[in-house]
Amino acid sequence: MKMYLSLSICFLAALAMPSAEGKKIERCKLARELKRHGFNGFLRSTVADWVCLVAHESNYNTSAIKDKGHSHNYGLFQINSKEWCDDGKTSGAQNACHIKCSKFLNDDIEDDSKCVKKIALKAHGLSAWPGWKEHCKGKDLSKYVKGCF
C-alpha cells in the first residue's frame, strides 16, 4: 500500500508539472483562426504567409519563449519584450501593444493578433520577423494551408 501511494503521488506530481515543450497549435486550426482574425489580405499578405511565419518563429508552440540577450520573444509570433509587451524584466521596455507578454503564451490568439498587426503596420509587413524573411518571403507557401479550407 505504501509503495502504491508513493507511485501515485509521483504520477500526480508529474501531471502537474508544466511541459517544457508547451502546447502546439495544429497548422490548419491556426490557419482558420488567422483567417477569422482578418489576416488574409492584411498588408497584401496571405494566411499562408502568417502560418509559415509561425512555423519558423515558434514551431507552432503557443508557449515559446526565446532569450534575445536583453529581451525575450513570446508566443506563436515571438513578440519582443523590448518594444511590444511588458515581461517585467526587460529594461527600457516600451510596451507599444500595452499588454503583458505572458498574454501571448496561451492558445487564444485574439490579443496576439492585435499586437502582431501593430507590428506589421509599423514594419511595413512581415519583414519584422526574421523567420518569415529567411524561410517564407517570395516562396510557394501553399503547403502551409493545404487542406485547411
Image (cartoon, helix red, strand yellow):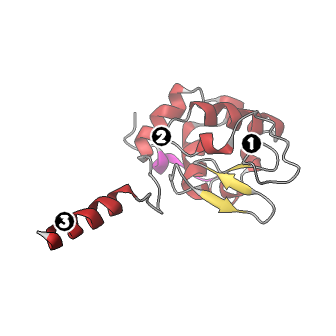
Residue farthest along the left direction in this orientation: 1
For label 1, count other residues whose C-alpha is less than 10 Å away and answer few (under 14), some (14-19) or many (20+).
Answer: many
Q: Amino acid at mark 3?
A: Leu
Q: Quadrant of the N terminus?
A: bottom left
The foreground one among 84 and 88 is 88
Q: Residue reaching furthest right?
A: 92
Q: Is residue 56 above or below residue 30?
A: below
Q: What amino acid is found at the position of numbered circle 1 in the picture? A: Cys
Foreground label between 2 and 1: 1
Mark 2 crowdedness (10 Å alpha carbons): few <14, some 14-19, many ≥20: many
135 in the magenta segment: no
Tell me which residue sits at (56%, 46%) in the image.
105
Q: Position of residue 75 (x, y in %)?
A: 59, 49
Q: Give the class, few, some or many, for how many residues have Cα within 10 Å of label 3's Cα (few <14, many ≥20).
A: few
Residue 143 is inside the magenta segment: yes
Task: Point out the stretch of residues depicted in magenta.
Answer: 138-144
Q: Which residue is mark 3?
A: 5
Mark 3 or 1 closer to N-term?
A: 3
Secondary structure state at the residue bearing disc 3: helix
State left or right for residue 45 relative to residue 23.
Answer: right
Residue type at mark 2? Answer: Leu
Marks 2 and 3 in Cβ contact (< 8 Å): no
Q: Which residue is mark 2?
A: 30
* Residue 17, quarter of the rendered image: bottom left
Marks 2 and 3, how far apart in space?
A: 41 Å
Question: Where does the image place residue 123, in percent across and percent down from the top left?
Answer: 81, 42
**Which residue is disc 1 drawn over?**
85
